[in-house]
Amino acid sequence: METSKSSRSRSRKPKLENFYKILGVRANATQVSIKQKYIAAVKACPPETHPEEFQQIRRAYETLKDPLKRREYDLMRKYGGKLEKMMEDIWKHVETGHYAKAETLVNQLIELMPEDHNIHLILAQIALLKEDLPEFNKQFEFVLKNAQDQDKPMLMVVKARMLVEEAEPEEALRVLDEARLNYPEEIHLFLSLYTDVYTDLDREDDLWEFTLTLVPAQGTETAKDIRIFIFWLNMMIELEQWSFKAKIQQRIRKLLKSVNNEEDKQMIARALEDEHDGYFDAGRFREAEIFIDFLYYLDSKNSEVQEQRRKTQEMMRVEKEIQKLQRDETVFPPIHFLALEWFYGDYWPPEELEYLSLSVPFLDSEAGEDLQIDEMFVQGIMLMRKKYPLLYRYSQDDWDELFAERVKNLNREARRQSKL
């Protein structure tokens, strides 16, 4: 019995904080009163001596000082469980294709929270699932009309993304072009979606031409253009336009050299670091090196940049050997695969390596089952050690263990000839 009670207790959801009680005001308090009580509470519980209480006070004030957030909070206090249940039911109906039932619940939500115009995004999503583009656009226009100006570019991103996910790339392209026209200073928000749309439309050549139209003219580039140059470089990589590499590198170095403002330098460094880390974490070291070189050019005295550049260059050199190994038909096939697995194991999805392993002959053979196969393993490791020393040293413990396992059953002469 106690176990059941304990289980129910653990599953109970945390109680909503009473922000009014935290600030010591009534639920109908004015904004002036809320601010006064906030100031008094902070003086009583400063962050230096009362960090937890201060965070509570801060959370309460950040919610209650904003009329819309306060309205939503009040609704959650009054209807919290009901609203949560309604949202669960809405998405359950959407997932099962019962769109009319979902729309009924959404409209009930709108009645409860008429000031939360983002609820209309759910109606837009339902309309899109019903392939009703006019209704989809109508709901989005309502949201955009009532949104804050600073939120509108991101809402256009949301609109285009929804269209892409529901296989409407032509309409998504129209939305992106409209957004780029209306919010040219926010172009960086739309770039990845342009890539998805042109790819879905099988228009890679148009994607490259589009990219070139974004590049600022010589001598007009500024720090904020770094996102455009990064996009240009990424498109060069993805579309294999490697003949442009030197030109792009020259333009980016010129931009980096022209930046004197420390804040701009930090912004550019973060952007370059993000790109480097993305490629590095995906095991794409050739591409990662391009970005770490730019980061080094920008801040060559930074010890962290120096160390990361050294590590990236080392991985790239090993990667070059593994690519050369994969073209070497004299190498025993399991050696090909194990080199890939031990090098990319931390970067590639396990299922991708598992799929590749299915087509590799002799990979599953046990040591001692077939001495001829054992000897081919041994000779393959010896060949790799001689021709691909960086790759061998990268996973030397694994190679040496495999070598010892395969060589032990060979005859004395074979073992003598096969010493590492």
Image (cartoon, rainbow, N blue to C red):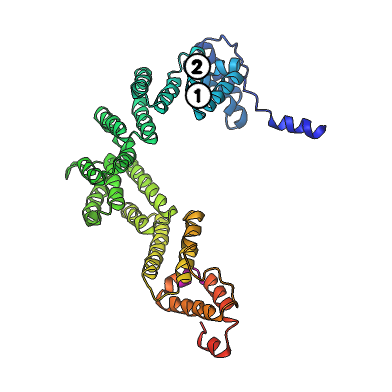
**What residue is at 35 percent from the left and 21 percent from the top?**
144
**Can residue 66 be seen in this snapshot?**
no
Q: Residues within 10 Å of mark 1 (few under 14, many from 20)?
A: some
Residue placed under numbered mark 2 in the picture = 104
The secondary structure type at the circle numbered 2 is: helix
Please, what is the three-letter code of the amino acid marked with disc 2? Thr
Residue placed under numbered mark 1 in the picture = 98
Residue 420 x %, y % = 51, 82
Residue 327 x %, y % = 36, 69
Left or right: 154 in relation to 61: left
| 340 up-or-down from 130: above or below | below
Earlier sequence position, callout 2 versus callout 1: 1
Judge by depth and name the residue closer to the eye, 290 or 330: 330
Highlighted range, magenta: 392-396
Main SS category, magenta section: helix
Left or right: 8 in relation to 384: right
Left or right: 196 in relation to 125: left
Q: Residue furthest bottom?
A: 413
Q: Residue furthest left?
A: 218
**What residue is at 24 percent from the left and 43 percent from the top?**
211
Q: Residues within 10 Å of mark 2 (few under 14, many from 20)?
A: few
The part of the image, by quadrant, that contains residue 223 is top left
**Can residue 202 be seen in this snapshot?**
yes
Q: How many marks?
A: 2
